[in-house]
Image (cartoon, rainbow, N blue to C red):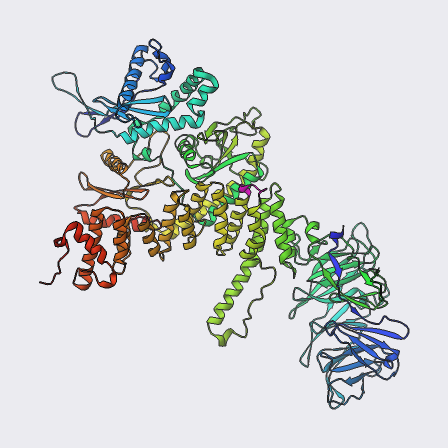
Amino acid sequence: MLMISPRMASGTQEKQYTPSLLSFFIYNPKFGPREGEEEKKILFYHPIEVEKNEKIRNVGLCEAIVQFTRTFCPTKPAKSLHTQKNRQFFHEPEENFWMVMVVRNPMIEKPSKDGKPPTVEYQEEEILDSVYGAVLQQCYSMYKLFNGTFGRSFEAGGVELLIQKLEKFFYRYLQTLHLQSCDLLDVFGGISFFPLDKMTYLKIQSFVNRVEESLSLVKYTAFLYNDQLIWSGLEQDDMRILYKYLTTSLFPRHTEPELAGRDSPLRPEVAGNLLHYGRFLTGPANLKDPEAKFRFPRIFVNTEDSYEELHLIVYKAMSAAVCFMINASVELTREFCEQLDALVGPQLTLLASDICEQYNINRRISGPEKEPQFKFIYFNHMNLAEKSTIHMRKTASVSLTSVHPDLMKILGDINSDFARVDEDEEIIVKAMTDYWVVGKKSDQRELYVILNQKNANLIEVNEEVKRLCATQFNNIFFLD
Amino acid sequence: MDQEYYLELSENPVQFENASSVNNVFFDEANKQVFAVRSGGATGVVVKGPEDKSPIAFRMDDKGEVKCIKFSLGNKILAVQRTPKSVDFTNFIPDFPHLEFSHECKTKNANVLGFCWTNWNEIVFVTDQGIEYYQVLPDKRSLKMLKSQSINVNWYIYCPETAVLLLSTTVQGNVLQPFAFKNGTMSKMPKFEIELPMVPKPAKISLSERDIAVSTIYGQLYVMYLKHQSRSTNSSGAEVVLYHLPREGAFKKTHILKLNTTGKFALNVVDNLVVVHHQSSQTSIIFDIKLREPDCAVNVHQPVLPARSIHPYKIPLTGPTAASVPCELYSSSWSVFQPDIIISASEGYLWYLQVKLQPTVNLLQDKGKLMDFLLRRRDCKMVILSVCSQMLDGGEKGNLPVIATVFDKLNQVYKEYLEAEQAYTVALESGPSRFSSSYKRPVRTQAVIDQSDMYTHVLSAFTENKDVSHKFIIAVVMEYIRSLNQFQITVQHYLYELVIKTLVQHNLFYMLHQFLQYHVLSDSKPLACLLLSLESTYPPAHQLSLDMLKRLSTANDEIVEVLLSKQQVLGALRFVRSVGGHDNVSARKFLDAARQTEDTMLFYTIFRFFEQRNLRLRGNPAFNPGEHCEEHNSYFKEVFGEQTLMKSAAV
């Protein structure tokens, strides 16, 4: 199953093909160490139609490459394999469990004259290891969030259970991988934080604390507004992947009922005179429905130490969304959901309109001159804070960027350079036409700016970036 | 049960010779003095006041039965009424003739109902036909009429605090005419009518002075009317009706206190609370007119607390045994005076009634209401703080909203005080001539509970409490910080420290990080230093600290130190240059740090930078002896050779 989306190059008859997923498999060499038992190693293989022997061959090749490169550096075996047609990424998230993703290189198909078959030119250097390596790691993190570790599943139900879980998860998940639109942001896997004044933030704190106190079942809470994070009771790494799930999968699936028409079935019901806009994004769509099921997705957090399995309740009112996480051993009932709805709904509705109001006030005060005219990506490794004026709103299907893919590639290249050394660095690149790309690294922060100024020279570009730092990042320590 | 008595009699009562056939006892509300007059004064008069340790004792001739006896303010002149027509005066001013002189009321056929001193030498005679306002001239031993007013008077009540005299007029006696006295002037205030429960036919006096009391509550003058009503379907028994008498403008019926019973009552005002004693049940109830009940034109109040008796009181027996006998409370021989005086003439005691706040804590379940109540009391601080502690340690579920309400109430009062204080400072600074007289320094009442009180008495102990979950501790401290912020009060550093300490103790660094990210813990140098100290356990604290120092914009030196300590010599230098301080920094400090890195190229760069600076500033790349860079200079020569040293530009 090839997923190829041709992109028309302007003016010519060339057809351009973006990178796409060729295959994806997971294996454990310990499960079939003897000859003739190789098939047992394979825990998951996509595409499923591939002939058994080919599967075995591919897995064996990967095993061999990893084993071979290990001799050079036992702690850091190969991460990827570049070939003309594709690139393979290797990831060992748990001991002896290997995940492999094979991506076909982008290519250009040139129609040839005289009725000969078209020639294909592979662009081997167009895709970045860092980006797709990160995508592979994300696959694991997402799997782990909903299924726990491979090891635990194996312990609990043997290979059968593990295979079953992997198939169930990845069958759907791989369809949502949009490899053509992966970029630097996938490397960062950052979190966008909602800018908020202190007082409103404290109100949210107060709200979270009150809810956790009166609904003592709630173990962790996370609060988001406008798809941006405000508060996380979860640890950073767990929040990172949960945030990814919420913003790229769950939220886009739910349109705003507030925006729905008066007669739309999505419009919230007026219960008594307690009007609130709260509703469950996970679990029951309608509490009044006698058939409603009170089942929520389960997630696994703190897998390194306490290994907790939790119910994930996502509740939303207007633009404010709250995740309540409850120990999975507790069975959630209709009564509990009603209690939560009655408690949280009105408060959250009020809070959401407070935040909206405060946000608008702040925006008015800061004025339009603070609105960035720059295209930039900022990332802080310390708190995973990410900000991009390059990317449009992420949707479930694609992330839209407003700049040319070539520029995005330069950003990725600079990032790879930064990753190689610890020191603070600054890289300025003159790209095609009038574009300049500037990358700055200060302590744990990275900033990438794309400038488009006619006939600008290096000094002017440098000044321009200084100006950006002074207006956008004046409240952090950012060496210039 | 013992903890529930919220009213008590003062521990040190004024003791006097009890009333008997030979000893008459009088009480003067103005000076709060008890007069024990033996045999019409012939065998002695003993005057005991609240403060004076030594009673005033004197003799006077027995010229007939004493009806009324009072000192003028400051015990200057004694006035005694013995007949219905006249009042006798005696000077108590040293160097003035001590001889008694007498004055007869001006109005013909009038009977003097009584008199009241409004000043040390001004007196009002109240007769059944009006009032006469006099100045007493002690040296001339005569009185000078200041003003008079003729009006039919049934009875009168005088409020010494405000110098307002209330006259009962008309046949039913329910039209009250107030007069105010001040510095020799008398002003007639608008009269008003007390609504009687039923109008008798034929008309007869229906309002007794026993059912009227005058007192100031929260700085305002009120006439309290004890309205007796039998309990029936449409009435819940007697009530106290409060009429507000403003200094200017018309009186207004403002509050109704529901007594929910009938019988004999007496009123006191203690700490701005109206205390109603009920004789038959031997209990008292209290009302706070500022405790808001559902809005309506006239505020109807229920008792703040359930009815309780006054705390049992024991009268010590005189003699060698330290025994004591219980005092009969609510005795029919008790007389109650405003605002807070209870006298037992038969036993010879004068007590002040007092409100104990601690017992109210358990009687008033609604914590918000309790705080409203406590914050208006005089000695409330420690009780409020103990309520807070108790509330936090209780660990009841659903407590946070209550805690939030309590914090908000405390901080409301705190903020008002801070604002008053600030306004006062501003007024002082804007020029003493204009405001100094009109602006008084705001009084800090006990109700002002500041952050240090809260920290010392409540939060520090609470956060040490091992039985409380850290989640709850953080929630409470954050709630307090939220409340302070809501009232725009600057949060003190030690509260932040408390939050950080708790978070660090439980390894909740990510929470801490988020708080700092949203600037919930305000920037300060101490906080930045605290963060720096956390770096070893939580590396991101380094970045947080540097960011904070940067935002402070007064901590550039600290930033340089931090960077140098991390051997980021070049970064430090670039920072100094970006803030324009590179002409003044110590070269030696940077060279020392560069040497420590053992990176010779780095050392070269730094050395070169300073040579260039020297050249720019002084025209010579060499270091001054005062800069103590000789050692580095020779090291440079040793590594890079003498010829590498920059040459002086002078050619």
* The quadrant where residue B291 appears: bottom right
**Where is residue B608 shown, x and y percent of the image?**
19, 54
* The quadrant where residue B609 appears: bottom left
Q: Is residue B373 above or below residue B57?
A: above
B235 or A299: nearer the viewer: A299
Residue B356 visible somewhere in the drawing: yes
- Name the residue furthest top: A36
Q: Is residue A246 above or below residue B465?
A: above
**Where is residue B472 shown, x and y percent of the image?**
55, 43
B314 or A112: nearer the viewer: B314
Q: Is residue B538 magenta?
A: no
Q: Is residue B300 left or right of residue A374?
A: right
Q: Count how many numbered circles sit on residues in the image.
A: 0
Q: Residue at x 14, y 16 (%)?
A: A116
Residue A320 visible somewhere in the drawing: no
Q: Is residue B538 left or right of residue B63?
A: left
- Name the residue furthest left: B651
B441 or B42: nearer the viewer: B42
Q: Is residue B331 above or below residue A100?
A: below
**Where is residue B287 shown, x and y percent of the image?**
71, 57
Q: Is residue B488 left or right of residue B29?
A: left
A116 or B175: nearer the viewer: A116
Q: Residue at x 71, y 67 (%)?
A: B215
Q: Is residue B186 left or right of residue B528?
A: right
- Name the residue furthest right: B21
* The quadrant where residue B175 appears: bottom right
Q: Is residue B469 magenta?
A: yes
Position of the C terminus of chain B by quadrant = bottom left
**Where is residue A242 shown, x and y percent of the image?**
42, 32
User: What is the span of residues highlighted in magenta in the rendered image?
Assistant: B466-472
